[in-house]
Amino acid sequence: MTCTIVVGGQWGDEGKGKIISYICNKDNPYIVARGGVGPNAGHTVEVDGKNYGIRMVPTGFPNRDSILAIGAGVLVDPEVLLKEIEMLSDFNIKNRIVVDYNCGIIEEKHKEMDKSNSHLSKEIGSTGTGCGPANVDRAMRTLKLAKDIEVLKEYLGDVSNLVNETLEEGNKNIVIEGTQGTLLSLYYGSYPYVTSKDTTASSFAADVGVGPTKIDEVIVVFKSYPTRVGEGPFPTEMSLEEAERLNLVEYGTVTGRRRRIGYFDYNLAKRACRLNGATQMALTCLDKYDSECYGVTNYEDLSEKGKRFIKEIEERVGVPVTLISTGPELHQTIDLRKEYGIKDE
Ligand code: GTP
Ligand code: IMP
Ligand code: MG
């Protein structure tokens, strides 16, 4: 039995949705529990030729046997959540989603403030999803909680209890899903150009009510070419012309904004691994680094260029790269966890 946290190592959008959905299909966790800030996240999951942009439902949803839990630390926008439950009706979300009684609730006024406040919307470049203003109200202890909301009634439960009881049974896998990225952390990111709370593995464990001694694996996800949306420093950023030349231009899942793009930053990657206590790294978009790697599922079939890049990351960061993503689809993944002696069930 393994309790694994998946966390972003850069500024979010590293492809956590892809990695988490792969792990959930492979390891068959009993629970996928979502931590993180709230619906400011936009995870992309591509399965059976269909593309889903998900902001609230845990991205382990393609595995129909997993319970999908949202931890008490996560802000819930009922409108967004109910729409997603409807949109994913083929996956039978309704009968297996559990929203913690104590999740904070985002109301219209929070979204309005996030969009109209020029410090947030212009200087910081927030997502406008109401997360920052809702966390202000949570700190003021005036925020409504999920247990106060009639339309959420049928989904409510005690996520911490559920996860801890499962851990005590000792024979089931659990995945804790993080959102955003380490460098957007309110404490460890480039303040004030950060999100409204800490976004490291320890916080995600706390979000779902699990103590640090219960965590077996921390997988930190990195993109071959990191991206950042919104304002703030980006030491290895490349020009738009260069990004266009390399065919790397991307747009945000939530806001549709163009993502700023840069080269892999080994020093920041090392820092992110430390802050999260990483036991493994996952590397996504290797096909963007070298198109010959597209869709490859065996390590031996990677190009020399691709293999050299992975080795350099491992040597300079000091953590093994155990999962390699070679395309957006769930199955376009190289899984080296067994080779590294990491159990996956
Ligand atoms: P946040 O929780 O918002 O931080 O998002 P995320 O980490 O889940 O990432 P998001 O889905 O927003 O962005 C990643 C983008 O890269 C999506 O468009 C994915 O479909 C895509 N993607 C993920 N892995 C790969 C890959 O290996 N190759 C390619 N070409 N695209 C990938
Ligand atoms: P907020 O979290 O909406 O307040 O936004 C604060 C900063 O974090 C902005 O730069 C956003 O672009 C960034 N941000 C928040 N959530 C995500 C995410 O899930 N992916 C990428 N960037 C994010
Ligand atoms: Mg995203």
Image (cartoon, rainbow, N blue to C red):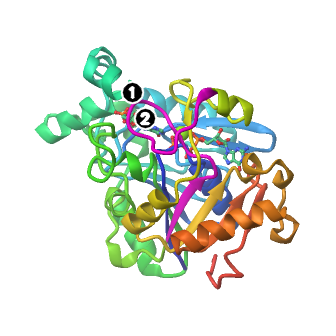
Vertical arrangement, residue 14 with respect to residue 216, above or below = above
**Is residue 129 covered in magenta?**
no
Residue located 68% across and 58% down the image = 22
Q: Which residue is mark 2?
A: 40
Q: Does the residue tagged 2 have its C-beta within 8 Å of any atom of ligand 2?
A: yes
Bounds of the magenta segment: 218-240
Q: Position of residue 72 (x, y in %)?
A: 32, 51
Q: Which mark is residue 217?
A: none
Q: Position of residue 73 (x, y in %)?
A: 31, 50
**Is residue 222 covered in magenta?**
yes
Q: Does the residue tagged 1 have its C-beta within 8 Å of any atom of ligand 2?
A: yes
Q: Nearer the viewer, residue 300 or 344?
A: 300
Q: Nearer the viewer, residue 42 or 148?
A: 42
Type of the residue with mark 2: Asn
- Can residue 331 be spotted in the picture? yes
Q: Which residue is mark 1?
A: 129
Residue located 67% across and 50% down the image = 62
| Left or right placement of residue 204 versus residue 345 in this view | left
Q: Quadrant of the C terminus?
A: bottom right
Circles 1 and 2, Cβ within 8 Å, touching? The answer is yes
Q: Position of residue 121 (x, y in %)?
A: 34, 21
Query: Splitting the image into four quadrants, where does ligand 1 fall?
Result: top right
Q: Nearer the viewer, residue 106 or 246?
A: 246
Residue located 39% across and 62% down the image = 201
Q: Residues within 10 Å of mark 2 (few under 14, many from 20)?
A: many
- Can residue 64 be spotted in the picture? no
